[in-house]
Image (spheres, rainbow, N blue to C red):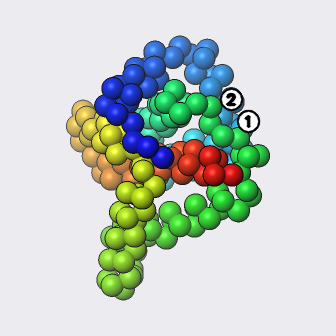
Amino acid sequence: MRELSEQELYNALAYAKSIDEELGKTIIENFQKEQPALAPAIFSIFPQFINEKNEEMAYLFMDLCFDVLCVFQHAFGQLPSQNEIDSDWLEKQAVLIDTELQALDDNTHMDEKIRSKLEDRFVERMIEDGTQTGLVRFMNESIDEFAAEKPSRVPAIKTTQTMIFIVIRLFSNLYSHAKTV
């Protein structure tokens, strides 16, 4: 998947911010219909991890996920339906990301050589997959700015940034995979 230019990213983010409540509701309903496995993960399971650290950051995460969805749809077209993807693909994505995330979590006990290899693989896959680094950077800045408003939000920064990165990577991989199917 190609990286969005600064102008394309700006236009897509402007589009996402211009959506009214009614259209936003329709976009979410369509996403839930077309991606019945991915939608609950993004809008229910992932926010629970963040909510353990800070509820406000969990709500921000869901807002940012909506923005990510809109950015991808604006820039790359309608999100591929789950029916267009082989059934094992999403499960494989989850397993790969989970393994790599464990390596990034300092609280996970792991041999340092294995941790280092998994961290390296995580970065390599990010580059190979064409994960939207400009979008990741923008989202991380948004998270930092929001967290800076209240000290109680700060402990959730890393978790929120990691989860938004996962969402962006999943969308990138989903669009890339749908084109090869």
- The image quadrant that residue 87 belongs to is bottom right
Q: Position of residue 15 (x, y in %)?
A: 45, 20
Q: Relative to 160, is 79 on the left or the right?
A: right
Secondary element at tag 2: helix
Name the residue: 50% across, 63% down.
Answer: 97
Location of mark 1 (residue)? 33
Q: Amino acid at mark 1?
A: Lys
Location of mark 2 (residue)? 29
Tell me whether circle 1 and circle 2 mark residues in contact (CB < 8 Å). Answer: yes
Report the front residue among 7 and 24: 7
Q: Position of residue 10 (x, y in %)?
A: 35, 25
Q: Amino acid at mark 2?
A: Glu
- The image quadrant that residue 105 belongs to is bottom left
Asked if residue 76 is positioned above or below residue 123 in the image, the reply reads above
Q: Which mark is residue 46?
A: none
Query: Which residue of the protein is positioned furthest toward the right in this rendering?
Result: 83
Q: Position of residue 111 (x, y in %)?
A: 36, 85
Asked if residue 68 is positioned above or below residue 89 in the image, the reply reads above
Report the front residue among 120 and 112: 120
Name the residue: 39% across, 36% down.
Answer: 4
Secondary element at tag 1: helix
Crowding at label 2, few (<14), some or many (≥20) Cα neighbours within 10 Å? few
Q: Position of residue 180 (x, y in %)?
A: 63, 52
